[in-house]
């Protein structure tokens, strides 16, 4: 059995999988005659392949039973997918470089001030939260083509995420 423990979410640690979306370290541009600030260029939204367009939506999520049995992974082959929490609640991110190698799974604990943008083709587990009714702004792809690939892991394989 593989037991995954989440590490802190940092831009450097998450770089192989996409972007950490946060105000910290972002380029700041004064706006609205000095009464506002734009935190610019936070993520690489990649949705134009095969005639895709940007889709902005809200997700709500409830916690799964702990410890979390990792039995499914998904990826988006023709577009990125970004999640940004709408409340200051920690949440979890689970990714893998290769779903056939248990050693290549990684878990991150994100703060409620951090979002993530999965790069195209990055294997990840569905949205994981600690609190019922957690809300997220989601930016991903809409349009022609199939932008979701789900793979159920073999039944005897034991990968568990324990926060």
Image: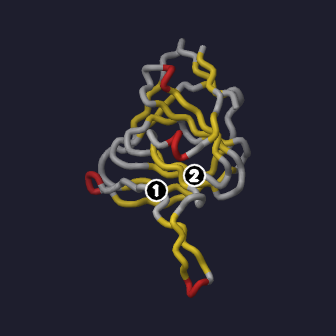
What residue does disc 2 label? 115
Q: Helix, strand, or loop for circle 2?
A: strand
Q: Helix, strand, or loop for circle 1?
A: loop
On-image quarter of the N terminus: top right
Asked whether, in this view, residue 112 is left or right of residue 26, the answer is right
Q: Are marks 2 and 1 in contact (CB under 8 Å)?
A: yes
Relative height, residue 148 to residue 26 (above, below): above
Checking the image for residue 32, the label placed there is: none
Residue at horizontal 45 percent and vertical 20 percent from the top: 101
Relative height, residue 148 to residue 48 (above, below): above
On-image quarter of the C terminus: top right
Relative height, residue 154 to residue 72 (above, below): above
**Numbered label tally:** 2
Q: Position of residue 44 (x, y in %)?
A: 41, 55
Q: Quadrant of residue 108?
A: top right
Residue at horizontal 54 percent and vertical 67 percent from the top: 39
What residue does disc 1 label? 43
Q: Quadrant of residue 32?
A: bottom right
Relative height, residue 109 to residue 19 (above, below): above
């Amino acid at each position: 059995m593989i037991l995954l423990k989440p590490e802190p979410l940092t831009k450097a640690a998450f770089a192989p999988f996409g972007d950490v979306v946060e105000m910290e370290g972002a380029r700041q541009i004064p706006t609205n005659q000095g009464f506002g600030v734009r935190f610019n260029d936070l993520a690489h939204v990649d949705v134009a392949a095969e005639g895709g367009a940007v889709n902005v939506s809200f997700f709500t999520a409830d916690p799964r039973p702990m410890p979390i049995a990792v039995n499914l992974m998904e990826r988006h082959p023709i577009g990125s997918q970004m999640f940004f929490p709408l409340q200051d609640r920690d949440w979890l991110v689970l990714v893998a470089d290769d779903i056939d190698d248990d050693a290549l799974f990684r878990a991150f604990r994100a703060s409620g001030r951090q979002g993530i943008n999965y790069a195209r083709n990055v294997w990840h587990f569905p949205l994981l939260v600690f609190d019922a009714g957690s809300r997220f702004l989601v930016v991903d792809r809409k349009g022609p083509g199939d932008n979701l690939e789900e793979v159920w892991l073999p039944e005897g394989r034991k990968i568990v995420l324990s926060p």
